């Protein structure tokens, strides 16, 4: 009904909303006002029609929905306690039987072993109007009065398990407690062979089962005079109570041969106490109930805890069946006595297997019953939904027909409103599109200027650093001046090229790029550009070729702009082509065009990168350079000014081919584009070689302060730093992080200088931060200081570098003097750190990796100390290092070589043995790894100026 109400309210809301929309529209003309009024009356009529239809729907659904049948009978069950396993089994048996009688409802009350509470619960059940009462009394006499009151009101009563003192009940269902007591007495007499002592643990003193079981047990024992009960313990049916009594009566238990308990849980409680005091082997335990399950009596017999138990049926199923007969007006016997039998080692396995199988089947039946209930509920729900859907479909058809009528009536009125809405929506979409484009353009320009700022830093560093270095010197070598000026000029040209491209970008944005085309030999022009890259190709061992089908080809083109296009394409090819690769420039005349191709076997691009490679400011997954993000976008602009076409074909890992198509003749050009071009400025140099040999000259025999490894992908900056540092240090240089890591493992340098933004041959190449983290996390290299040299100078960048483990962070452009002082200070502090550990052979470093290395090294030496054949070679293999790596690592951490470290540990061990023990000197010599006592004496005297005997007798030692 709630769903139908929402359905109705939804339609009312739609038409009210339409009414409000019409009212809030712009001023209407007179004819439209008439149409509006007519349409509003139709809406109100339709609202009334919907109300009538939905009212009919509610009536139909009220007749269709099935109500859950009311329970025919309410059965109240008052249980003395539900805490023990036997009582829980009884309740489960009742529920299993009730599954066959869905018309019965069971009201369950648990008294928790409290007679007063059970009396109140029986009164509550009677007040709730139950049709039948099942009661299992906690104590017989006190419960009788409450049961009598219920029975006298005409409510049938079934007494279960324990009797009451009156006959106010329809039927009594129970096992034969007297007979089960006799069975237990007969078994105990047989077990003891007519001679022995018994401790009897009884149930609640006022309950009829306890009284009857005691009666039957004593009657049977009376026939065996040699078996006597030496103590009776009131366990009150509970394990804890029985356990406490057993603790108190443990001296009596020491005299007992058998413990007979009125139920299994009390027997288990006494057995636990006997086991605690070691009495469980001399005493045998017998219980009553014979419950199934993992903690029932059958399992206790199977585990050897109980010698035997006796099945005492719960009567749960029988009570429900008797209730069904009584409520259906059928006769039931006055008493139903359930049979019992003995369970011992001879039959427990078969009974246990059978009970477990029944238990499993019962669980399956319950699970299937729940599943059937779920399916029934699902069926009922789906049927109701079907009714609702069918009626809704009828309503929708009626409403659709009526709506079609309204649409035809109001089509003219709504058409103008729809047109106005479309116009407003289009204007809104246009405004949003322009806003998105403006926002995207702003973000791209901000990103572009960020890239450009970074691109300025490296050339500025290579201009400012040599200049400041020259100004700071008092005496300057003319060769160094020339090399520095060549470097400054080259990077000034690079900045000029960057500025020119930015100006061209501005002209392209403003639409003011002017073409100055004239006829020239395209083959000679391309040949000159290719030759400019010849030295760079030779240095990188790249096969650079110009392959032309024509010796000469006349073409109208703008020399300056086409030079920039080819320069960008070749620069891009060199950037991504590995050492030993190839770059081929092909020139071929076609029917109406000339084809120029730049092909390489470099890294290649993905399909997505190819789609965006000519987009302005696009850099893909790589760092920004002149060749991408700006250069390729301008290159396409320049080619399109020539009415040509620039395309790209690439495959990841297979290389890239840029194809340039330029039309022949001049008919495709505007006459204003054919004006003679002004005199050309000298071309910008591509990659001038500056005299590395000259700048790298160092004074012969100059002492080096250590080994530095420089990781920098910018060739000129790397070469300049090598030249400036080579006179003080042994400098190793690599261009990628991967190559740098391999060189670090080979040489273990004293200090590492690395850029952060490093380009590699693959998209997964490491950067400087990742290289620093790898250095600091590897115990072989964790002691090497790292200086990060980068153009990223913001505070968050410095924090990130420090977090990676860098010892210093220097931003570009930088002063050479500051870099040198940073290097010197770092190495001096490192030397002081080394000296800190020369006093003790086990360094207490704060670095976990270094501490791990020193601990492993020391532990391995001490472990092999008595092995006279164990030396540096074996030690390096055990440590997983080469001999050179082990030497450098030990020298870095301790300031001493491995042999000296060996000797120091042996000497320290010998001193300790001489001081703290009275062992013979020969034995001490062998324990410290010396091949003979004579060699040990010589070695010891060389280092302490005393023989081992003199050292042991010296006053300072004895004191």
Image (spheres, rainbow, N blue to C red):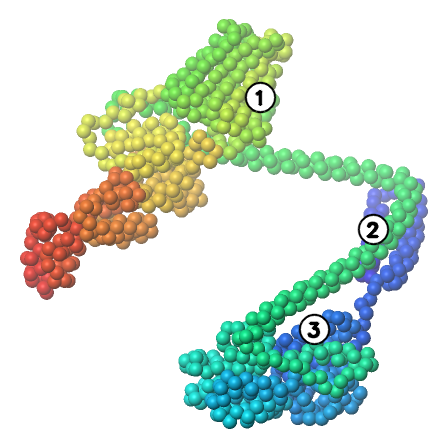
Between 88 and 516, the one lying in front of the other is 88
Tag of residue 647: 1
On screen, residue 824 versus residue 389, left or right, reads left
Quickly name the residue at label 2.
14
**Mark 3 and 1 residues: CB-CB less than 8 Å, in contact?**
no
Q: CA distance from mark 1 to mark 2?
A: 56 Å
Up the image or down, 454 lies above or below 264; here it is above
Q: Is residue 668 visible?
A: yes
Q: For marks 3 and 2, give the one nearer the viewer.
A: 3
Residue 665 at what x, y percent from top left?
60, 7
Tell me which residue sits at (34%, 41%) in the image.
786
Tag of residue 95: 3
Tell me which residue sits at (90%, 49%) in the image.
398
Asked which secondary structure carries label 3, the reply is: helix
Residue 226 at what x, y percent from top left?
49, 92
Up the image or down, 233 lies above or below 562; here it is below
Marks 3 and 2, the one that precedes in the sequence: 2
């Amino acid at each position: 009904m709630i769903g139908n109400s929402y359905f109705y309210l939804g339609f009312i809301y739609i038409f009210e909303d339409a009414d409000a929309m019409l009212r809030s529209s712009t001023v209407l003309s007179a004819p439209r006002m008439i149409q509006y009024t007519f349409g509003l009356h139709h809406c109100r009529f339709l609202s009334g029609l919907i109300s009538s239809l939905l009212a009919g729907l509610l009536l139909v659904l009220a007749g269709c929905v099935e109500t859950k049948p009311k329970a025919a009978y309410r059965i109240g069950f008052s249980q003395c306690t539900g805490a023990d396993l036997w009582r829980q089994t009884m309740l489960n048996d009742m529920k299993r039987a009730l599954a066959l009688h869905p018309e019965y409802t069971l009201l369950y009350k648990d008294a928790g072993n409290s007679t007063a509470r059970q009396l109140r619960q029986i009164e509550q059940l009677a007040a709730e109007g139950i049709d039948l009462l099942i009661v299992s009394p906690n104590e017989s006499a006190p419960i009788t009065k409450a049961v009598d009151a219920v029975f006298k009101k005409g409510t049938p009563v079934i007494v279960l398990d324990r009797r009451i003192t009156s006959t106010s009940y329809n039927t009594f269902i129970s096992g034969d407690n007297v007979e089960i007591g006799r069975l237990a007495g007969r078994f105990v007499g047989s077990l003891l062979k007519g001679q022995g002592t018994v401790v009897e643990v009884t149930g609640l003193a006022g309950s009829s089962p306890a009284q009857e079981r005691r009666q039957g047990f004593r009657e049977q024992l009376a026939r065996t005079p040699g078996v006597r009960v030496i103590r009776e313990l009131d366990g009150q049916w509970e394990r804890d109570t029985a356990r406490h009594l057993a603790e108190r009566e443990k001296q009596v238990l020491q005299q007992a041969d058998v413990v007979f308990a009125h139920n299994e849980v009390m027997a288990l409680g006494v057995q636990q106490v006997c086991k605690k005091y070691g009495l469980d082997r001399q005493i045998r335990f017998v219980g009553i109930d014979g419950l199934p399950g993992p903690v029932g009596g059958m399992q206790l017999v199977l585990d050897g805890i109980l010698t035997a138990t006796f099945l005492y049926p719960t009567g749960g199923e029988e009570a429900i069946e008797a209730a069904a007969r009584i409520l259906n007006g059928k006769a039931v016997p006055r008493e139903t006595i359930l049979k019992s039998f003995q369970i011992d080692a001879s039959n427990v396995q078969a009974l246990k297997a059978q009970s477990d199988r029944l238990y499993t089947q019962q669980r399956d039946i319950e699970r299937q019953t729940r599943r059937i209930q779920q399916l029934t509920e699902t069926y009922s729900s789906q049927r109701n939904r079907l009714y609702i859907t069918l009626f809704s479909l009828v309503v929708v058809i009626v409403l659709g027909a009526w709506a079609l009528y309204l649409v035809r009536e109001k089509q003219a009125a709504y058409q103008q409103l729809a047109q106005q809405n479309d116009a407003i929506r289009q204007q809104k979409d246009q405004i949003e599109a322009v806003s998105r484009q403006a926002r995207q353009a702003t973000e791209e320009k901000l990103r572009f200027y960020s890239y450009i700022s970074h691109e300025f830093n490296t050339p500025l560093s290579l201009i400012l650093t040599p200049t400041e270095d020259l100004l700071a010197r008092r005496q300057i070598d003319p060769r160094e001046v020339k090399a520095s000026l060549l470097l400054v000029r080259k990077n000034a040209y690079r900045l000029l090229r960057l500025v020119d491209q930015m100006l061209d970008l501005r002209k392209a944005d403003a639409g003011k790029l002017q073409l100055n085309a004239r006829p020239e030999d395209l083959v000679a022009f391309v040949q000159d550009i290719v030759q400019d890259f010849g030295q760079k190709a030779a240095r990188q061992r790249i096969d650079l070729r110009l392959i032309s089908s024509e010796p000469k080809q006349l073409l109208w083109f703008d020399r300056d702009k086409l030079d920039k296009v080819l320069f960008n394409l070749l620069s891009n090819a060199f950037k991504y082509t590995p050492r030993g690769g190839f770059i081929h420039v092909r020139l071929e005349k076609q029917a109406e065009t000339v084809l120029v191709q730049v092909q390489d076997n470099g890294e290649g691009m993905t399909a997505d990168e190819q789609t965006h490679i000519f987009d302005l400011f696009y850099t893909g997954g790589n760092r920004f350079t002149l060749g991408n993000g700006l250069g390729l976008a301008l290159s396409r602009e320049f080619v399109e000014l020539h009415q040509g076409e620039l395309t790209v074909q690439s495959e990841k890992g297979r290389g890239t081919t840029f194809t340039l198509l330029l039309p022949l003749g001049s008919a495709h050009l505007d006459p204003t584009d054919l004006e003679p071009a002004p005199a050309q400025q000298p071309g910008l140099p591509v990659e001038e070689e500056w005299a590395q040999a000259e700048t790298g000259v160092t004074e012969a025999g100059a002492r080096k302060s250590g080994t530095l490894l420089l990781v920098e992908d910018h060739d000129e900056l790397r070469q300049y730093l090598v030249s400036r540092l080579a006179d003080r240090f042994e400098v190793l240089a690599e261009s990628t992080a991967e190559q740098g890591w391999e060189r670090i493992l080979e040489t273990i340098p004293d200090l590492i200088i690395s850029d952060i933004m490093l380009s590699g041959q693959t998209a997964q190449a490491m950067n400087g931060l990742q290289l620093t983290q790898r250095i600091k996390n590897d115990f072989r290299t964790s002691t090497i200081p790292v200086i990060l040299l980068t153009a990223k100078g913001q505070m968050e960048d410095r924090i990130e570098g420090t977090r990676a483990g860098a010892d210093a962070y220097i931003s570009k452009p930088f002063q050479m003097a500051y870099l040198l002082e940073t290097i010197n200070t770092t190495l001096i502090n490192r030397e002081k750190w080394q000296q800190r550990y020369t006093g003790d052979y086990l360094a207490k470093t704060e670095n976990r990796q270094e501490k791990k290395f020193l601990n492993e090294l020391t532990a391995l030496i001490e472990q092999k100390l008595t092995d006279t054949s164990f030396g540096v070679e074996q030690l390096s293999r055990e440590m997983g290092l080469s001999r050179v790596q082990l030497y450098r690592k030990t020298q870095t951490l301790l300031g001493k070589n491995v042999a000296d470290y060996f000797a120091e540990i042996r000497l320290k061990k010998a001193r300790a043995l001489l001081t703290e023990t009275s062992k013979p000197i020969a034995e001490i010599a062998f324990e410290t790894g010396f091949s003979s006592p004579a060699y040990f004496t010589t070695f010891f005297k060389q280092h302490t100026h005393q023989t081992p005997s003199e050292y042991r007798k010296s006053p300072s030692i004895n004191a």
